[in-house]
Image: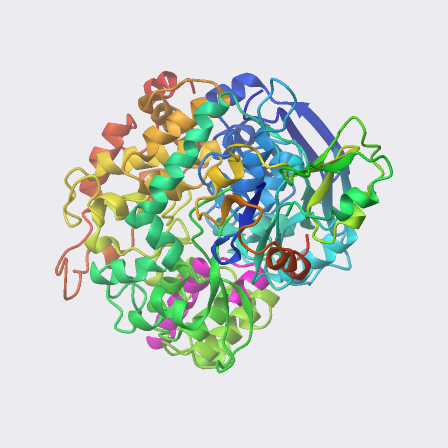
C-alpha cells in the first residue's frame, strides 16, 4: 500500500499477548487513519460505557498514511482513547521524532488493551515486539525515562512515556515523547498509567511508499513558498508565542481565569522575550520545515534551573496570563515541570486558575491547600504542580482537575472549560466562533479540533467580524471537518489550517502519497464522517445538547474594556443553527439520515 | 573540480527532510519510498540538544574509508574528487564505517553507502532553511565541516 504500512498491532497487557493484523483496506478508505481510524477501532472493539481508567478502556497510538511521507509537517502521531477528564472520546496529538520511528517500524496503529499486573514498557524494533519490566522506571521523570530506555534498547530508539503524573492518574496527565513533545490533553497519560504501561520505545528502519514522487517533490516548492511567507518567517522566528501579541492586541488573551482578555504583562512573556532570554534555537519536528519548536533553557541569572522545549503560546496563556504570572522564567520552569512530570500545561493552568479564584473568594482556604494561593504567586504554583504530579497532600485532589474542584467547592461557574476540559488561549467573548468550537468539540474545551483564529482574528481569506455569531456555525463546521481530515492523515494542523489554500494543498498531497484522488469537498466529507462518529460515540454515553455548554462568564458576563467591550457568546442561537446545518436533531444527536449519508448507518 | 554537499550549522533545525528526500533516490527499483534508514545524509543532535549537524561525505582527498577497505571497493576519482563505493565489490565488513572519523559512511543492509553527490541533490532541494548546498570541493572549509562531525557525532 502507498502511505499506509498495512499492519495494526494489538497488545493485550492483561494476557501479555501480542497480535498483528493486516489493515482492512475498507477501514483505511472510509476513515483514512489517525484520529479517524482510531475512533472507528474503539467504537467497534471497546464497550463505550467502560471506565476510562479501567482495563476495558483501550489506548490507541496511531499515525496516518501521510505521516513520514515527506508531505509538509508530516511528523505527527495521535493517542486516541476514552478520556478520564471528560468521559468522552478524545484524540491528543504530538510531533517530535517518536512518530517517525512508530511509522517506519511498520505500524499504522498500536492498540493497547487490558492492564498489566506490574509496570511494563513496550519495546518495538521493526517487526520485533516485546513487553519488558518497568518496575525500575516507575516514578522516573520523562527525560530520565527516555535516556534510560534508549540505553537499555537502542540509541536510535524513540520513546513516548508517562511521568509520575500519569502513574498517579492525574486526570490531565500527558504522554510525553522525545522528552519535550506532549500528547498532552484529555488525560491520555492517566489512561496509560492505569494500564501500568510506562513507555513505548520504538526503532524503525522501514519506509513509507509514495504513489507519485514527482508530485511529492513539489512539496519542496510549497515549503519554499511557506518559508518566504510572513507565516513561515514568523513561525521559525517566534514559534507559537507570536500569538501572545496577536491575541493580546485582539483582547482575547485569557487573563485572570477569563475575567479579562488583556494581560498588561504580556510583553514580558511573549515570543520576543523568549528570544531575548531563553531561546537556544528554533527546532523542527521530524519532516517539518516550519521549525516552530522553542528549544530553551533558563539563563544563569534566573531563580530557576532547567532546559527543555517551550513555552508554547497555550502555556503562556495557561500558566502566565490566566493566573497572572508575568514572569517568563517562572512560567518556563512550570512548563519544564509539566513536561518532566508528564502533565498537560493547559489543564494544569486552568486547574490553578480555578483554585486561585476559589481561594480569592474564600471557598478554598490556606488550610485546605496547605498554603495560600493568591493570583500570580509563581512559587506556590510550582510547589502545587509538584504536589499534583506526585499525588501529595492537596495535590491529589487538585489532580482531579478544575471542574472537579469547582464542583466540590460549590462554585461550578468558576471552572473555565467545557465537558471538564479547560479552554485554550482564545477568549470567546471577543471571538464567538471559538466559543461554539469549544462547546461542540468532541473532547471539551479544545482549540485544535477546528480553530477559527485564521478567519476570526487573522482575517484570512477575508476579514470576518469576531464579535458576531453570523456565519460562525458554517465556519466552525467547515474547520472541524477539515481538521478531522488533517488529523486522520497524520500531519500537523499548522501549515494546512493556517495557509489560505491549506486544504486544497493537503488534498493534492494526499493523492500524491496514497494514490487516491479526492477533491477538497471529498476530503471534507471524510472529515465530517470522522467528526460524526466521534459525536455518535459520545451520544451513546448520553452526551447531548445539555453538555454543549460554556460557563456563564462567557455567555452572560459582558467582555471588558477594548475590542468587543460588552460582548457575550450567544451560544444557544449559534447551536440551533449549528445542529441544523450538521443534520443533527435539536438535542444535538446525529440524525439517522445524516449517519446513513456518511456511511455510518 | 569536484562537488560536495556543504552544510551550514547555523541554519539547521533538525527536521531531517534532507534524509527523507535523499532516501527517495535510493529505494528499490520501481518503488518510491521515504526511508530515512537508507539516507546518505543523516542528522545528529548533541547530548544537550543545542546543536544539530547533518553528516554528509566531505569527499576527502585522502579518504580513510578507501584506505581501510580490504576489498578496494571504495575509490576516489582523481579527476572529479568523488569518493564512491562499488556495491558489487563491497564485502560488508564495516571497516570503512569504523575508519571514517566523520561518521559519513553508513551500512544499509550488508553494503556500505555514502553520499556520491547527485547531479540535482534532493537533500538540497528539500532543505527549506538552505542549510545545505551543492558546492565545489574547493569551496567552504571541509576541515571545519569535519570538525563539526567530531563535535556532534551520530
Residue A413, magenta (yes or no):
no
- Judge from the rendering whether residue A408 lies leftward or rightward of residue A265; answer left or right: right
The residue lying at 82 percent from left, 41 percent from top is B94
Q: How many labels were placed on the picture?
A: 0
Dividing the picture into quadrants, the one containing residue A321 is bottom left
Q: Position of residue B132 (x, y in %)?
A: 51, 46
Q: Position of residue A9 (x, y in %)?
A: 67, 31
| Residue A270 can be seen, yes or no | no
The residue lying at 47 percent from left, 30 percent from top is A36
| Residue A350 can be seen, yes or no | yes
Nearest to the observer: residue A197 or residue A213:
A213
Nearest to the observer: residue B69 or residue A28:
B69
Q: Position of residue A479 (x, y in %)?
A: 31, 37
Q: Position of residue A132 (x, y in %)?
A: 78, 47
The part of the chain drawn in magenta is: A336-361
- Judge from the rendering whether residue A416 lies leftward or rightward of residue B142; answer left or right: left
Dividing the picture into quadrants, the one containing residue B22 is top right
- Tell me the chief SS of the magenta region: helix
Nearest to the observer: residue A196 or residue A415:
A196
Position above or below: A152 against A411: above
The residue lying at 62 percent from left, 33 percent from top is B35
The coloring applied to the image is: rainbow
Amino acid at each position: 500500500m502507498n502511505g499506509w504500512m498495512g499492519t495494526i498491532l494489538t497488545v493485550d497487557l492483561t494476557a501479555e499477548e501480542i497480535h498483528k493484523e493486516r489493515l482492512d483496506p475498507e477501514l483505511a478508505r472510509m476513515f483514512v487513519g489517525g484520529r479517524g481510524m482510531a475512533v472507528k477501532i474503539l467504537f467497534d472493539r471497546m464497550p463505550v460505557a467502560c471506565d476510562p481508567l479501567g482495563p476495558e478502556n483501550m489506548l490507541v497510538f496511531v499515525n496516518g498514511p501521510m505521516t513520514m511521507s515527506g508531505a509538509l509537517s508530516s511528523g505527527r502521531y495521535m493517542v486516541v482513547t476514552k478520556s478520564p477528564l471528560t468521559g468522552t472520546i478524545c484524540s491528543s496529538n504530538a510531533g517530535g521524532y517518536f512518530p517517525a520511528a512508530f511509522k517506519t517500524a511498520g505500524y499504522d496503529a498500536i492498540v493497547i488493551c487490558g492492564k498489566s499486573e506490574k509496570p511494563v514498557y513496550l519495546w518495538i524494533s521493526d517487526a520485533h515486539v516485546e513487553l519488558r519490566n518497568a518496575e525500575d522506571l516507575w516514578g522516573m521523570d520523562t527525560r530520565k525515562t527516555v535516556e534510560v530506555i534508549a540505553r537499555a534498547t537502542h540509541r536510535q530508539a524513540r520513546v513516548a512515556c508517562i511521568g509520575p503524573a500519569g502513574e498517579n492518574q492525574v486526570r490531565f496527565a500527558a504522554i510525553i515523547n522525545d522528552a519535550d513533545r506532549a500528547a498532552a490533553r484529555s488525560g491520555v497519560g492517566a489512561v496509560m498509567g492505569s494500564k501500568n504501561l510506562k513507555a513505548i520505545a520504538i526503532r524503525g528502519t522501514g519506509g513509507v511508499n509514495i504513489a507519485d514522487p514527482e508530485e511529492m517533490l513539489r512539496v519542496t516548492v510549497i515549503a519554499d513558498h511557506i518559508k518566504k511567507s510572513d507565516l513561515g518567517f514568523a513561525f521559525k522566528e517566534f514559534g507559537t508565542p507570536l500569538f501572545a501579541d496577536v491575541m493580546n492586541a485582539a483582547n482575547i488573551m485569557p487573563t485572570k481565569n477569563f475575567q479579562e482578555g488583556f494581560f498588561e504583562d504580556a510583553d514580558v512573556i511573549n515570543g520576543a522575550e523568549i528570544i531575548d532570554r531563553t531561546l537556544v534555537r528554533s527546532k523542527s519536528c521530524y519532516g517539518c520545515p516550519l521549525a516552530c519548536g522553542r528549544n530553551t533553557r533558563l539563563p544563569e541569572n534566573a531563580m530557576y534551573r532547567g532546559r527543555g522545549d517551550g513555552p508554547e503560546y497555550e502555556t503562556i496563556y495557561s500558566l502566565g496570563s490566566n493566573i497572572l504570572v508575568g514572569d517568563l522564567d517562572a512560567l518556563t520552569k512550570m512548563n519544564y515541570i509539566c513536561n518532566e512530570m508528564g502533565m498537560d500545561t493547559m489543564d494544569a493552568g486552568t486547574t490553578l486558575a480555578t483554585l486561585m479564584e476559589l481561594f480569592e473568594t474564600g471557598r478554598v482556604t490556606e488550610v485546605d491547600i496547605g498554603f495560600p494561593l493568591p493570583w500570580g504567586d509563581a512559587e506556590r504554583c510550582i510547589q502545587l504542580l509538584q504536589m499534583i504530579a506526585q499525588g501529595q497532600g492537596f495535590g491529589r485532589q487538585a489532580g482531579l482537575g478544575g471542574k472537579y474542584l469547582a464542583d466540590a467547592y460549590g462554585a461550578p461557574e468558576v471552572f473555565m472549560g467545557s465537558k471538564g476540559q479547560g479552554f485554550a488561549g482564545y477568549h470567546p467573548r471577543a471571538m464567538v466562533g471559538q466559543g461554539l468550537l469549544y462547546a461542540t468539540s468532541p473532547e471539551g474545551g479544545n482549540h485544535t479540533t477546528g480553530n477559527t483564529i485564521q478567519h476570526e482574528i487573522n482575517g484570512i481569506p477575508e476579514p470576518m467580524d469576531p464579535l458576531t455569531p453570523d456565519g460562525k456555525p458554517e465556519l466552525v463546521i467547515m474547520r472541524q471537518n477539515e481538521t478531522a481530515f488533517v488529523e486522520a492523515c497524520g500531519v500537523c494542523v499548522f501549515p494546512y489550517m493556517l495557509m489560505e489554500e491549506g486544504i486544497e494543498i493537503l488534498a493534492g498531497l494526499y493523492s500524491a502519497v496514497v494514490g487516491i484522488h479526492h477533491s477538497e469537498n471529498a476530503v471534507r466529507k471524510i472529515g465530517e464522517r470522522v467528526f460524526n462518529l466521534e459525536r455518535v460515540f459520545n451520544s451513546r454515553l448520553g452526551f447531548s445538547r445539555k453538555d454543549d455548554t460554556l460557563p456563564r462568564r462567557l455567555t452572560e458576563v459582558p467582555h471588558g474594556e477594548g475590542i468587543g467591550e460588552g460582548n457575550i457568546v450567544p451560544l444557544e442561537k449559534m447551536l440551533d443553527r449549528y445542529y441544523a446545518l450538521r443534520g443533527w436533531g435539536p438535542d444535538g444527536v446525529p440524525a439517522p439520515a445524516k449517519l446513513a449519508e456518511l456511511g455510518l448507518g | 573540480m569536484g562537488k560536495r554537499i556543504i552544510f551550514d550549522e547555523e541554519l539547521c533545525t533538525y527536521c531531517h527532510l534532507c534524509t527523507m528526500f535523499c532516501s527517495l533516490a535510493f529505494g528499490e527499483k520501481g518503488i518510491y519510498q521515504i526511508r530515512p534508514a537508507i539516507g546518505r545524509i543523516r542528522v545528529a543532535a548533541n547530548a544537550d540538544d543545542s546543536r544539530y549537524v547533518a553528516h554528509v561525505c566531505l569527499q576527502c582527498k585522502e579518504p580513510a574509508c578507501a584506505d581501510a577497505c580490504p576489498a578496494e571497493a571504495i575509490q576516489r576519482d582523481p579527476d572529479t574528487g568523488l569518493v564512491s563505493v562499488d556495491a558489487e565489490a563491497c564485502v560488508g565488513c564495516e571497516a570503512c564505517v569504523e575508519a571514517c572519523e566523520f561518521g559519513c559512511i553508513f551500512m544499509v543492509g550488508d553494503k556500505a553507502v555514502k553520499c556520491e553527490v547527485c547531479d540535482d541533490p534532493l537533500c538540497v532541494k528539500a532543505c527549506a532553511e538552505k542549510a545545505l548546498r551543492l558546492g565545489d570541493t574547493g569551496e567552504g572549509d571541509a576541515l571545519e565541516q569535519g570538525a563539526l562531525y567530531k563535535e556532534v557525532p551520530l
